[in-house]
Structure formats: structure tokens, C-alpha cells
Amino acid sequence: MPAGPIKCAGAPQKIAYLAADWWRHQHVLDKTRIILVLPTAAMFSQPDWAKVLEGVAAGYGIEVRKESQLTEVDGGARRAVIADTKAGTKGTIDYDLLHAVPPQSAPDWVKDSPLADPAVPAGYVKADKHTLVHPGWPNVFTLGDVANLPTSKTGAAARKQSPVLVANLTAAMGGRPAAARYNGYTSCPLVTSRNRMLLAEFDYDLKPTPSIPLINTMKPRYDMWLLKRYGLPALYWHLMLRGRA
């Protein structure tokens, strides 16, 4: 997992769990060394789900290297260099399979514009985290992956940001102040095996904000996997993109 904001922070972990689950079913997991490299000090930004993911990784025997980054790759030699950013050391690892998520950033035309937040090298658009209004240009609104908001860049976050942006844009067009507020809600569906998933939902304060009542989404579940496999695609294609949800 690279340093800096990325689209769906759980994505680099999902492939590790899915690969481990496959290797377990092929009866070779005990012969396979899996190394998960994370730039963060915790498995996940929200501490409750971080504890659950610690258990998931341990159950597969995954070696988790926190506060570390992939800095060099020699594809021909199948060799990777991992830097421990806390200790200030580097180590070389020979690999058979490498899954690397590249660092991400805003498009160059945004990054090189006055709209970009100068405090962020990735060049995401500066915005008030609640109103989604640019502090320098009150007629500029932003949401989604390009917005420099202190929350995960997920489709669920954009879904909750959209009505706030529309309400505040409409208010601005009518000469009224931006009154709608986004609370930082985001959702990260974390697939932990071929048929299990846990659903992390939280706000700016990292407070769990579950949207499904009476279901404990803090553990991998089959019904949550069904939601991921069938429910979320239908929600996305037929409701979100049509502005109905």
C-alpha cells in the first residue's frame, strides 16, 4: 500500500486476503510467505476494524510490515526493497509474485492549478471538509477522489457528498450561505475471503456509523459478501449513477 490518500484504502489489503484464501484452498498456504507492506502505524484508520483486520491477517499467517514502503523494484531479478520509515532502515526481499499499488494523485491539470491544496503533494483540490466549498473561491465546489478531504476516497463517500454539494451549490446560486454539511461518512467493504466481507462505516471522528441495523458488520460475514457481490453493483449502476440514492 503506498503512502498518501488512495482510492479505497482497503483495496491493497483485499488482494492479500483473497490470495491467502486461494492458497489455503490449494493447500499451499503453509508453504507461502505473504508480506503485506503498509505505510501506516495501524492496519486501518478506524481502530475497531483495525483490530478485526489484525486477526484476519494473523489467521492467514500474513507478515504485516507497518510504517514501511516499497521503494525499489527490480523486475528482472524479482527483488523488492522495503524501507522501514520508523527505523530508517531498508531491506531486500526476493519475490515470486508482487502486487504493488502505485502512489496516486490528482490529474496534472488540477495539481498544477491554483485550486490544488499546497499542503498536499498529490495536488488534490482544497475544500472545506463540511461544505465542500473551496476556501479561496466560493463558487468552486469539489467532491470525490479529487477533493482533499480527511476521509477515505470511496464511492460511498462521494454518494454522501453529492447531496451536500448540490444543496450548497444551489444555495450559492440563490445568494444564500452554504448550510448543508458533510460529516465525513465513508464506507469500505473489506473482502477477507472468497465469500466473507466486513463493512467498515465511519465518519470524520472515526465513529462507527452503521447503515444496516441489527447486523454486526465488525466481523467477516457471508451476507455482507452477498451485499458486495450483488447489492452494491446494483446500487451503483441503477441508483447512484442515476441520482436516486
Image (cartoon, rainbow, N blue to C red):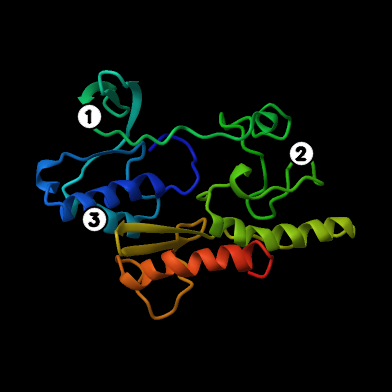
- Relative height, residue 85 to residue 14 (above, below): above
- Inter-mark Cα distance, 1 to 3: 22 Å
Identify the secondary structure beneath mark 1.
loop
N-terminal-most mark, 2 or 3: 3
Q: Furthest-right residue in view? A: 174
Mark whose residue sits in front, 1 or 3 = 1
Q: Earlier in the sequence, mark 1 or mark 3?
A: 3
Distance between mark 2 and mark 1 Cα atoms = 48 Å
Q: Which residue has dot 3 on it?
A: 56
Q: Which mark is residue 57?
A: none
What residue did someone put label 2 on? 136
- 169 or 100: nearer the viewer: 100
Residue 19 higher or lower than 224, as above or below: above
Task: List x then y, in percent, for residue 207.
Answer: 45, 62
Q: Would you call the spot at circle 1 few (<14 residues within 10 Å), some (14-19), or many (20 or more)?
A: some
Residue holding disc 1: 95
**Does residue 25 sit above or below 111 in this rendering?**
below
Identify which amino acid the numbered label 1 is placed on: Tyr
61 with respect to 165 (left or right): left
Instruction: Name the residue rendered at 63%, 33% in the picture.
Output: 107
Q: Residue at x 22, y 56 (%)?
A: 55
Q: Residue at x 72, y 35 (%)?
A: 115
Name the foreground residue: 237 vs 47.
237
> Is residue 184 visible to the viewer in this orientation of the structure?
no
Q: Closer to the camera, 183 or 221? A: 221
